[in-house]
Image: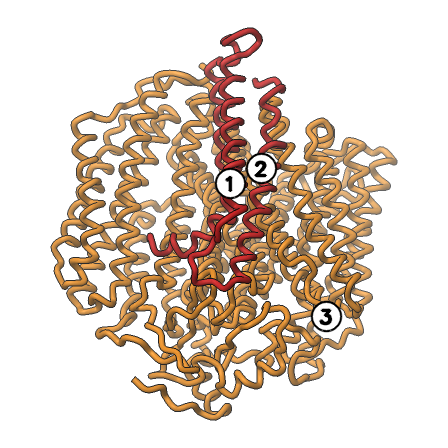
């Protein structure tokens, strides 16, 4: 299994931004639903900030930080294991960078509502 | 070892045909060849399309006037349910599977797909499952709860007959073919390419299918789980969707649309892939923006998995959650647009020939863009609140699905049917047929936007006798008949093509992809020898390459010991890695599918003792598939021509079957994750929680079984090395630990006092059964490993069977541990939370 994962690893790097987006989607949607069920939106943390909002915004921040990390990573270093030619390396690198950018934008647009929308 | 001598082209052709060909008469039932199975898939899907189309005409006949007595509402419900079910499950998906099965090996420069018998098994499951559903229609007991089978309408209380069971079991039977095709396609694209074909040189259709198959792998398991849970509720009263006992009808909607929305893209992407392949041929230049298109369709694949709730805007979900899905729904339009602009750029930079397939491209662009724009409209919550469940949505979905699938597929048919038949189309009827379909379609469905906005609900068999509705509906019905005549003309046109089409020698469209570098109609072995690809696979010269390959001047340009051989490469860079020996034609896929059908029929007719026994012959038959497969001695490196030698896949660490096992386990894990999601969803949102009398696992026995599972995991890992040395001890230990796990989980499931009392207990019960089942599967694999070691099929070089087994063992042990954790969690959550 390790061999297969190593072999397909570069493709994993290419889609890592959207893997993060998918994980974030499930985590933020699940947290929002669970928070509403547990009345987190009614528990004031400080001022107008509720537990629900604080947790969701924190999650959102973590996700954005993750995307930032991926963006930084995808700008450097080869994304293949050395068996691929230079054209393939360039292709994988370009795809990884573009997808990292797109997924970061998708996260910002999809989850930005946690900052101001009514949570429950 | 020396390389076998090359034969001349004709002798090579005869030798290869003798090995790869499908026999005549009844031997056709043993066919496993991708060309044969692919064509069967497409032909069967076309038959189902005709049946579904006929039902569509019945619907339009009913709605041609406001108070029509043509059908009573019960029959109408069966007709519209079956129309949607057939078009989605029995036409669209199998048609794309057939297209991919037929084309992919040829585009990738391989002789066949990775698992020909699995392809054949998938086809028979599709045929038998589809036949069960159509038979139910003929007998008047067809599903009647709508194609998405919402509970509680489809629950036993409101659908007491067999109708809903036909859908749940029939569709699950059919979906075996979808999952097997997904695994087959993923492995074939990643591994069975021509040497030198790195990912950046892959034909664009392969990229589309790679993404599509990945989506199928994680998209179908939630639907299969939902179908299992609903059937368990209907058959055994386990209350997953019953709000009176801790269940929730919305769980079904989540599970269904987790599949249902990606499904739209699963249907669209292969069709778009076909366009991206044949549009450049007629534009006279390669596809513009290849990299942008690859990036766009990967983004599309992911985004489409995050839209499922946009079918559920009105069920009472908080605004914040709606914003996630609304944003994703709007975003997915962007990668779609990237593809459309890439096609327009290809046309504008090329010198387009307006041959017949291009008519369908323009029809597609016109209709699909309208469907996409109305899609953005219904993605916006305020608009959807107004249009939901109205004919506007019917119009939108037909613009997307017919525009996005039927038109491209017809274009693809006119492009590739000459490849299948070796004849060029006559085309006298093709243009009138196109215009009748195009005009008829728009007449039928554009008007539905208007009737929908005027408030006409979908699925109603009567409507108020207002001129605004009645005239529009009448025009819509006339349009549907014009469209149907158009499809009839297409059928006639193809019949004329088969009978009177002019033979051609090679590559009539001057395409630059590999499928034209072979004789047409294609021989069973596809390529007499395999190419070395040195450029992007849509910029090749098939005429030159084809002559070279036919003469045996590529890889494997010879026959070795009567084996069916093709090559596998490293997944990213495309360097040649192993020679893959494929299995011969066999009746086993057919027989196994028949045995599988017995299981589903026994479930359908509630003969549960047969359903309980049926898995035994099914497992036995699958094991029979492996008899004679493998090598009894090491063969080392084998020459493949052009001075290159590689090991056989039996001696390779990265054999296709290891990859297939991995992908199968990913699908399996998705199903289990969907079950866990179901349990947590019910805890969060279902009424009737906390669960009364929720059973808790015993701490001591939990720790004991955890130790068993842990030891099992380590033991299984050690079992491969030991097996290589001929020692059977660790495999036997693994078998015993699986047996212990199966016993524990089965006993735990049986010890739950009343799984029908509450959804929490039912969910844990199903999870425990899942763990027990996987322990039994692990036991079977361990025993199989023991047999393979004892019978001499395993050596330090030949470890394929044990490597596959290791993956299954690790998954089974991990599934047991996760199930245990899930039980503890549900026991804890069952005493709190929820909306009491």
Q: Position of residue B128 (x, y in %)?
A: 47, 58
Asked if one can make out residue B825 in the rendered structure from this viewpoint, the answer is yes
Q: Nearer the viewer, mark 3 or mark 2?
A: 2
Work out how far the residue at label 3 is from the one at label 2, CA to CA, in angstroms. 51 Å
In the rendered view, does B343 fall on the left or right side of B125? right
Q: How is the image coloured?
A: by chain
**Residue neighbourhood size for the residue with mark 3, other residues' Cα within 10 Å, grouped as few (<14), some (14–19), many (≥20):** some
In the rendered view, does B337 fall on the left or right side of A61? right
Q: Which residue is mark 1?
A: A70
Q: Which residue is mark 2?
A: A104
Tag 3 and tag 2 share a subunit: no
Q: Nearer the viewer, mark 1 or mark 3?
A: 1
Work out how far the residue at label 2 is from the one at label 1, CA to CA, in angstroms. 9 Å
Q: Position of residue A114 (x, y in %)?
A: 58, 23
Q: Position of residue B685 (x, y in %)?
A: 48, 22
Q: Are marks 2 and 1 in contact (CB under 8 Å)?
A: yes
Image quadrant in which the C terminus of chain A is located: top right
Nearer to us in this view, B205 or B757 = B205
Tint applied to chain A in the drawing: red
Q: Residue at x 21, y 40 (%)?
A: B709
Asked if one can make out residue B738 in the rendered structure from this viewpoint, the answer is no
Q: Which residue is mark 3?
A: B492
Work out how far the residue at label 1 is from the one at label 3, CA to CA, in angstroms. 55 Å
Identify the secondary structure beneath mark 2. Answer: helix
Identify the secondary structure beneath mark 3. Answer: helix
Q: Earlier in the sequence, mark 2 or mark 1?
A: 1
Q: Residue at x 32, y 61 (%)?
A: B622
In the rendered view, does B703 fall on the left or right side of B836? left
Q: Residue at x 41, y 66 (%)?
A: B117
Nearer to us in this view, B38 or B50 = B38
Identify the secondary structure beneath mark 1. Answer: helix
């Amino acid at each position: 299994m390790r061999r297969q994962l190593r072999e397909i690893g570069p493709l994993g790097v290419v889609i890592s931004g959207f893997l993060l987006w998918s994980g974030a989607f499930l985590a933020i949607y699940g947290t929002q639903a669970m928070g509403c069920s547990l009345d987190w939106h009614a528990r004031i943390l400080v001022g107008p900030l509720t537990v629900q909002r604080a947790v969701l915004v924190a999650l959102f921040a973590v996700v954005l930080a993750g995307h930032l990390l991926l963006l930084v990573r995808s700008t450097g270093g080869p994304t293949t294991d050395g068996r691929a030619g230079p054209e393939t390396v360039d292709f994988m690198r370009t795809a990884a960078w573009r997808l990292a950018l797109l997924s970061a934008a998708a996260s910002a647009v999809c989850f930005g509502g946690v900052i101001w929308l009514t949570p429950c | 070892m020396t390389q076998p001598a090359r034969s001349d082209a004709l002798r090579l052709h005869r030798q290869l045909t003798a090995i790869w060909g499908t026999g005549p008469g009844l031997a056709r039932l043993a066919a496993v060849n991708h060309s044969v199975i692919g064509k069967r898939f497409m032909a069967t899907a076309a038959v189902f399309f005709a049946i579904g189309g006929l039902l569509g005409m019945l619907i339009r006949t009913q709605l041609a006037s406001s108070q029509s007595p043509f059908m009573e509402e019960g029959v109408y419900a069966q007709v519209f349910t079956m129309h949607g079910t057939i078009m989605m499950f029995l036409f669209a998906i199998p048609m794309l599977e057939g297209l991919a099965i037929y084309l992919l090996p040829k585009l990738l420069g391989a002789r066949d797909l990775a698992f020909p018998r699995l392809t054949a098994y998938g086809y028979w499951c599709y045929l038998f499952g589809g036949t069960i559903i159509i038979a139910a229609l003929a007998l008047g007991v067809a599903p009647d709860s709508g194609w998405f089978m919402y509970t509680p309408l489809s629950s036993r209380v409101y659908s007491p007959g067999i109708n809903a069971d036909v859908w749940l079991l029939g569709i699950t039977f059919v979906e075996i073919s979808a999952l097997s095709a997904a695994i087959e396609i993923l492995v074939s694209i990643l591994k069975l390419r021509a040497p030198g074909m790195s990912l950046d040189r892959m034909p664009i259709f392969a990229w589309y299918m790679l993404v599509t198959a990945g989506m199928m792998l994680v998209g179908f398991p939630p639907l299969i789980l939902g179908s299992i849970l609903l059937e368990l509720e209907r058959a055994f009263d386990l209350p997953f969707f019953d709000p009176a006992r801790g269940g929730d009808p919305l769980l079904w909607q989540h599970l269904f649309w987790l599949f249902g929305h990606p499904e739209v893209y699963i249907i669209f992407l292969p069709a778009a892939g076909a366009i991206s392949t044949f549009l450049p041929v007629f534009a006279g230049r390669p596809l513009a923006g290849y990299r942008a298109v690859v990036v766009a369709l990967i983004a599309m694949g992911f985004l489409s998995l995050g839209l499922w709730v946009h079918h559920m805007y009105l069920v009472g979900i908080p605004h914040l959650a709606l914003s996630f899905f609304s944003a994703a729904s709007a975003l997915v339009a962007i990668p779609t647009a990237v593809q459309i602009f890439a096609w327009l750029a290809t046309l504008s930079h090329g010198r387009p020939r307006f041959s017949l397939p291009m008519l369908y491209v323009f029809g597609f662009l016109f209709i699909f863009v309208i469907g996409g724009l109305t899609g953005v409209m219904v993605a916006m919550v305020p608009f959807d609140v107004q249009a939901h469940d109205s004919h506007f949505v019917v119009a939108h979905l037909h613009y997307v699905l017919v525009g996005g699938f039927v038109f491209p597929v017809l274009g693809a048919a006119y492009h590739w049917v000459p490849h299948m038949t070796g004849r060029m189309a006559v085309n006298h009827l093709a243009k009138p047929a196109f215009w009748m379909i195009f005009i008829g379609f728009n007449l039928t469905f554009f008007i539905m936007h208007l009737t929908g906005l005027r408030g006409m609900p979908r699925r109603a068999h009567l409507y108020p006798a207002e001129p605004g509705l009645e005239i529009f509906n009448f025009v819509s019905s006339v349009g549907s008949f014009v469209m149907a005549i158009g499809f009839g003309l297409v059928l006639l046109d193809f019949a004329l093509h088969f009978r009177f089409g002019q033979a051609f020698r090679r590559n009539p469209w001057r395409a630059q992809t590999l499928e034209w570098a072979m004789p047409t109609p294609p021989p069973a072995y596809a390529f007499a020898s395999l190419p070395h690809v040195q450029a992007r696979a849509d910029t090749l010269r098939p005429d030159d390459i084809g002559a070279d390959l036919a003469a045996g001047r590529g890889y494997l340009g010879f026959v070795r010991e009567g084996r069916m051989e093709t090559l596998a490469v490293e997944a990213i860079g495309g360097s040649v890695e192993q020679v893959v020996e494929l299995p011969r034609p066999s009746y086993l896929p057919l027989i196994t599918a028949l045995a599988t059908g017995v299981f589903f029929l026994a479930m359908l007719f509630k003969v549960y003792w047969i359903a309980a026994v049926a898995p035994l012959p099914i497992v036995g038959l699958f094991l029979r598939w492996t008899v004679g497969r493998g090598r009894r001695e090491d063969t080392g490196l084998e020459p493949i021509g052009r001075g290159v030698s590689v090991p056989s896949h039996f001696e390779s660490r990265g054999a296709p079957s290891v990859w297939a096992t991995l992908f199968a386990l990913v699908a399996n894990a998705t199903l289990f994750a969907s079950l866990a999601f179901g349990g947590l969803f019910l805890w969060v949102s279902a009424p009737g929680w906390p669960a009364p009398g929720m059973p808790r696992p015993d701490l001591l026995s939990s720790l004991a079984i955890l130790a068993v599972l842990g030891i099992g995991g380590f033991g299984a890992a050690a079992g491969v090395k030991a097996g290589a040395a001929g020692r059977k001890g660790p495999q036997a230990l693994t078998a015993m630990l699986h047996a212990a796990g199966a016993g524990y989980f089965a006993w735990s499931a049986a010890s739950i006092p009343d799984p029908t009392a509450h959804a929490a207990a039912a969910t844990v019960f199903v999870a425990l059964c899942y763990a027990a089942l996987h322990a039994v599967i692990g036991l079977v694999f361990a025993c199989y490993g023991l047999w393979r070691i004892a019978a001499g099929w395993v050596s330090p070089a030949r470890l394929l069977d044990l490597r596959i087994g290791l993956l299954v063992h690790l998954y089974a042990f991990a599934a047991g541990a996760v199930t245990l954790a899930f039980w503890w969690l549900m026991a804890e959550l069952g005493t709190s939370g929820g909306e009491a």
